[in-house]
Image: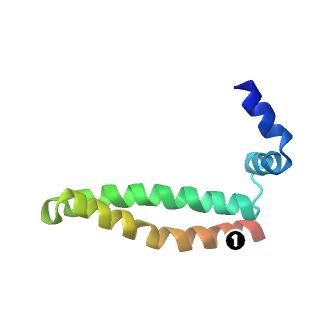
Amino acid sequence: MTEILGNLSSNAIMHDFLHNLMIGEITWLTGIFWLAIAAIISMIGGAIGGILLAGKDLGYELAALLGGLFGPAGVIPVAMIGLVILKLV
């Protein structure tokens, strides 16, 4: 495990990425990372919400599928706007 962490710190790009994540600086790479995290969490939340709201009517699998597809539709634009505002402030 220490060898893997040692190799990560020797890579300059990975070192800068991890450093920017730790200090909270928003760059292109960290912005894409946070956008991907927001999309994944919104897919999970949308699937759970779809199951709770329409699971009995549509079937649990279809409700989860639709919730997972429509969940990120509102989150991704707002997350992008939020990251831009945080970068400018």
Spot occupied by residue 41 in the image (x, y as percentages of width and height): 47, 55
Task: Give the answer, above or below, for where 84 lies relative to 17.
Answer: below
Question: Is residue 2 visible from the viewing direction of this image?
Answer: yes
In the foreground, 73 or 85:
73
Query: Residue 27 occupies which quadrant of the picture?
Result: bottom right
Task: Give the answer, above or below, for where 56 lies relative to 16.
Answer: below
Question: Is residue 89 visible from the viewing direction of this image?
Answer: no
At horizontal 25% and vertical 57% (from top left) the residue drawn is 51
Secondary structure of the residue carrying numbered label 1: helix
Question: Three-letter amino acid code at disc 1?
Answer: Ile
At horizontal 37% and vertical 61% (from top left) the residue drawn is 46
Q: Would residue 54 appear left or right of 33 to someone viewing this image?
A: left
Task: Give the answer, above or below, for where 8 lies relative to 38.
Answer: above
Query: Residue 82 occupies which quadrant of the picture?
Result: bottom right
- Residue found at the far top of this picture: 2
Query: Residue 8 occupies which quadrant of the picture?
Result: top right
Spot occupied by residue 7 in the image (x, y as percentages of width and height): 79, 36
Other-residue count near label 1 (Cα within 10 Å), few / some / many at <14 / 14–19 / ≥20: few
**Number of numbered labels in the structure image:** 1
Spot occupied by residue 35 in the image (x, y as percentages of width and height): 59, 62
- Residue found at the far left of this picture: 57
Tell me how the rendering is colored.
Answer: rainbow
Q: Which residue is mark 1?
A: 85
Spot occupied by residue 49 in the image (x, y as percentages of width and height): 31, 59
Q: Quadrant of the N terminus?
A: top right
Q: Quadrant of the C terminus?
A: bottom right
